[in-house]
Amino acid sequence: GQNIDQPTEMTATEGAIVQINCTYQTSGFNGLFWYQQHAGEAPTFLSYNVLDGLEEKGRFSSFLSRSKGYSYLLLKELQMKDSASYLCAVSNTNAGKSTFGDGTTLTVKP
Amino acid sequence: NAGVTQTPKFRVLKTGQSMTLLCAQDMNHEYMYWYRQDPGMGLRLIHYSVGEGTTAKGEVPDGYNVSRLKKQNFLLGLESAAPSQTSVYFCASSYREPGLGLVNEQFFGPGTRLTVL
């Protein structure tokens, strides 16, 4: 089975940097995804890590350590529109199935 | 490209009624998934399909059935709806990177908000 843990809520200030952590235990590993989900909308893809290290995409970066079962999503220069839920998802080796964490609700304040 | 579409967007059922949710994708993706999302929770996989004519159970399959008669469509059926099935249902699709064996990110439909009274 798979178990994914991430904080339930976080608050940060506009213009600041925030790091959202995700730890996981999995019986198979085919990569880790981060998705963003605004209230009332569908999740949208943010980033993917399959090898250890940092992947950078504009204001968003994601880090993976497979040996530690740990990932984080780093959001820089926060904007009000970044207020959303961020879902960590681990893909196992079977048909690309992903197990999702419960999500971290990020509130960005002025 | 419409991406992933779902119908209907909203539905209210009475306990015991049946219904079918339709998911369609125009990206020629092999993999399709049905999830449910309850308030404050992540996505839980109901059923999935790795190709036309194939389906498999996810982590919460009880009370649901699925069919994938065409590659672009994935149907989710509730034979006898229960209040516990009140949720938001998301369909998603994905594809395998040619030659690499990795399955890429999932593309989600807009969701169906179902209430069972």
Image: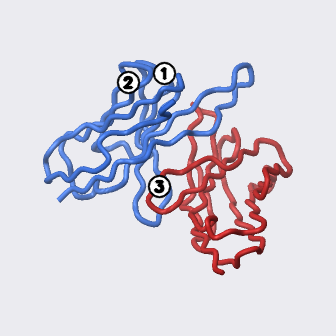
Chain at numbered mark 1: B
Q: Position of residue A43 (x, y in %)?
A: 54, 51
Say which residue label 2 marks: B68
Front residue (pair B39, A84): A84
Rendered hue of chain A is: red
Residue B84 in which image quadrant: bottom left
Same chain under badges 1 and 2? The reply is: yes
Chain in blue in the render = B
Label annotation for residue A99: none
Q: Position of residue A103 (x, y in %)?
A: 57, 62
At horizontal 37% and vertical 53% (from top left) the residue drawn is B88
Mark in front: 2 vs 3: 3
Examine the rendered structure and indicate whether residue B24 appears above or below residue A85.
above
For the residues marked 2 and 3, what is the alpha-carbon distance in whole angstroms?
25 Å
| Residue type, mark 1 in image | Gly
Q: Position of residue A73 (x, y in %)?
A: 73, 60
Q: Is A25 displayed left or right of A75 in the figure?
A: left
For the residues marked 3 and 1, what is the alpha-carbon distance in whole angstroms?
27 Å
